[in-house]
Image (spheres, rainbow, N blue to C red):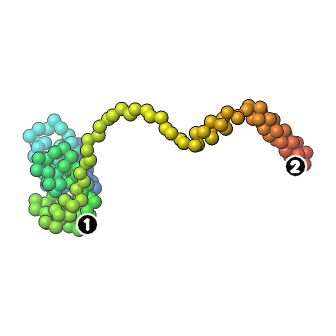
Amino acid sequence: MEQLNASWDEATQRVEAYLAAHRVAPREDLLRHVLSIIDAARAQHASDATQPPVAVAMAIATERTDRWFAGLAGAADRDSQAASRGRLAYLVSGCAERWPGTFLSGNPPTEMIEALRAKVVQAGPAMEFRSLVRREVDYGPMEDIARETWGQFSWGHVLRAFALWVVIFFIALGVYLRFFE
């Protein structure tokens, strides 16, 4: 019995954290929603105890919030992304701060609905994959200059420059060791 009470305490804490993440205010409303969800979870758990209390409570919490957010987004058919669009519009429009106490309410104010619908994000067209055909790039006069420069390239110049820098390095090293050691 004690373990079951600990499970319900954990379920209560998780639901409270989940709703607090949605910026539910004031605290009285937060606790009222948490207790409502926990009561529904207890009733469901009493009829089917195969799921742990945390899973039952969180399933009810996410189902209620998803349904509410989908309704805010104006999704009559409850498509799979409606809850995400409603949640995003709710957070972007600042409804939690402007209309506290309306979270999960059956009849949100019309001003809130208008503010939300103005912020609803619509996805763009479906992505299409296509194969790209390689085309030659015309670099204009730069290509001619580069080709002429490359044609004049000689490894002898590179080797002479390398030998010069090696000599300079050993001279500098000798000076350092002679005077600074």
Q: Residue at x 16, y 35 (%)?
A: 50
Whole-percent x and y of residue 5? 20, 47
Whole-percent x and y of residue 175? 88, 46
Query: As rendered, which of 67 and 150 lies closer to the eye?
Result: 150
Whole-percent x and y of residue 136? 48, 35
Q: Is residue 58 visible?
A: no
Q: Residue at x 77, y 32 (%)?
A: 156
SS state under label 1: helix
Residue designated by label 1: 97
Q: Is residue 33 left or right of residue 91?
A: left
Which image quadrant for residue 158? top right
SS state under label 2: helix
Whole-percent x and y of residue 177? 87, 44
Query: As rendered, which of 3 and 47 lies closer to the eye?
Result: 47
Distance CA(mark 1)–CA(mark 2): 70 Å
Q: Residue at x 20, y 50 (%)?
A: 83
Q: Is residue 89 left or right of residue 109?
A: right
Label whose residue precedes the other's in the sequence (1 or 2) = 1
The amino acid type found where label 1 is placed reads Glu
Q: Is residue 148 visible?
A: yes
Question: What is the crowding at mark 2: few (fewer than 14 residues within 10 Å), some, or many (at least 20)?
Answer: few
Query: As rendered, which of 100 and 151 lies closer to the eye?
Result: 151
Which image quadrant for residue 164? top right
Q: How many marks?
A: 2
Residue designated by label 2: 180
